[in-house]
Image (tube, rainbow, N blue to C red):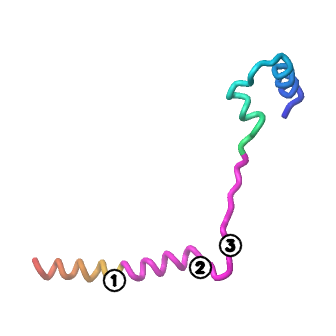
Amino acid sequence: MKKELRQQIIEKLQRGEELSAEWARFLFPPEKREYELVYHGKEREEDIIANTLAGVVPNLVERCLRRADSL
């Protein structure tokens, strides 16, 4: 935080004034962090997608063929 901003806050508080909500972003700046959950036995995203699609695609093909036969 810049020294001027810190001084403005101190002066407002010493005068008994309340700080407006706009000061919150200076006092409590948001931290932008990304986290990745890692644990033993975790599957890779690529493997999960491949396994999911492996079960969906054959069923989808079979349903389409059944519909074509019934027409």
The amino acid type, in three-letter code, at marker 3 is Val
Question: Which residue type does callout 1 highlight?
Answer: Pro
Question: Closer to the observer: label 1 or label 3?
Answer: 3
Tag 1 residue: 58
Task: Give how far apart the Cα atoms at labels 2 and 1 are.
Answer: 23 Å
Mark 1, other Cα within 10 Å: few <14 / some 14–19 / many ≥20: few
Q: Are marks 2 and 3 in contact (CB under 8 Å)?
A: no
Quarter of the image where one finds residue 71 = bottom left
Q: Does 39 lie within the magenta span?
A: yes
Label 3 neighbour load within 10 Å: few <14, some 14-19, many 20+: few
For label 1, the SS is: helix
- Quadrant containing the N terminus in the rendered view: top right
Q: Is residue 11 left or right of residue 63?
A: right
Task: State the residue at coordinates (17%, 77%).
Answer: 67
Separation (CA) of disc 1 from disc 3 = 32 Å
Instruction: Identify the image quadrant of residue 66.
Output: bottom left
Q: Position of residue 70 (x, y in %)?
A: 11, 80
Q: Position of residue 63 (x, y in %)?
A: 24, 79
Q: Nearer the viewer, residue 58 or 29?
A: 29
Q: Is residue 37 left or right of residue 13?
A: left
State the extent of the magenta-drawn residues as a range.
31-56
Q: How many marks?
A: 3
Residue identified by numbered label 2: 43
Q: CA distance from mark 2 to mark 3?
A: 10 Å
Q: Report the residue that reaches farthest toward the front.
A: 16
Mark nearer the viewer, 2 or 1: 2
Q: Is residue 14 above or below residue 58?
A: above
**Residue 32 in the image, given as x and y percentages of width and height:** 70, 49
Residue drawn 74% across and 24% down?
19
Q: Which residue is mark 3?
A: 38
